[in-house]
Image (cartoon, rainbow, N blue to C red):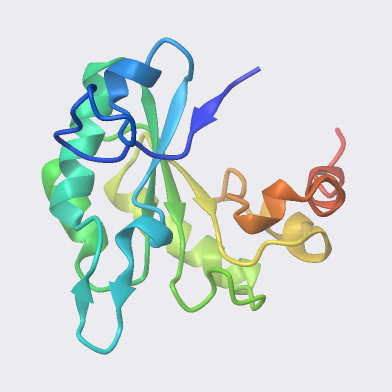
Amino acid sequence: MIISAQNFDSVDADPKKTSQITPKMIGEFVDYVILGHSEVRNFDKASRKYLGDTPEIINTKNKLAQDEGLETIVCISDIAGELESFYTANPDYSGIIAYEPISNVGTGVNLPAKDANKKAKEILKKFKNAKVIYGGSVKGENARDYFIQPYLSGVLVGNGSSDPEFFSKIINAFPKE
């Protein structure tokens, strides 16, 4: 079984504060950590500014997590500059990149699987040893479409992962070999 944490609170988390957790604190309990999810980036479309974790913070968190032996799942949106910023700081990244177009996250409207696959192919041109997964309104009805794409290695399920019935439909959509 592989276990993942959803994030760690801050680059300079103080272990004495009960509201924060550091990579060191989770390192012995989890294998992966998800960084840069749209909910922690909180990009404001009107002001074109990040209200939460910036690309620079994500790059720092990625290094801190890897220094603790954690594999990272780094979420990249379709906002101009995010992919380039991550590539500049991490050109040899070989973890998992979750492509999350902001117009599809939590909206109930998914990006067509072929379009997600096209973006995954583009990402893999930069990160040759990484894997790309798709996140953005994945449901049992559309999950199989992503699972069969040649450049996608899976999906990142958001809110639906907390609903066992909803989540089991996604799991059951995985092609049986």
Q: How many marks?
A: 0
Q: Nearer the viewer, residue 68 or 125?
A: 68
| Residue 92 on image: x %, y % | 22, 34
| Residue 112 on image: x %, y % | 63, 74
Depicted 105 relative to depicted 155: above or below? below
- Left or right: where does residue 164 sit relative to residue 108? right
Q: Nearer the viewer, residue 32 or 123?
A: 32
Depicted 77 relative to depicted 61: above or below? below
Depicted 109 relative to depicted 37: above or below? below
At 13% across and 51% down in the image, what residue appears? Answer: 56
Quadrant placement of the N terminus? top right
Q: Nearer the viewer, residue 146 or 100?
A: 100
At 34% across and 17% down in the image, what residue appears? Answer: 25
| Residue 96 on image: x %, y % | 43, 39
Q: Quadrant of residue 171?
A: top right
At 25% across and 60% down in the image, what residue appears? Answer: 52
Viewer can see residue 50: yes
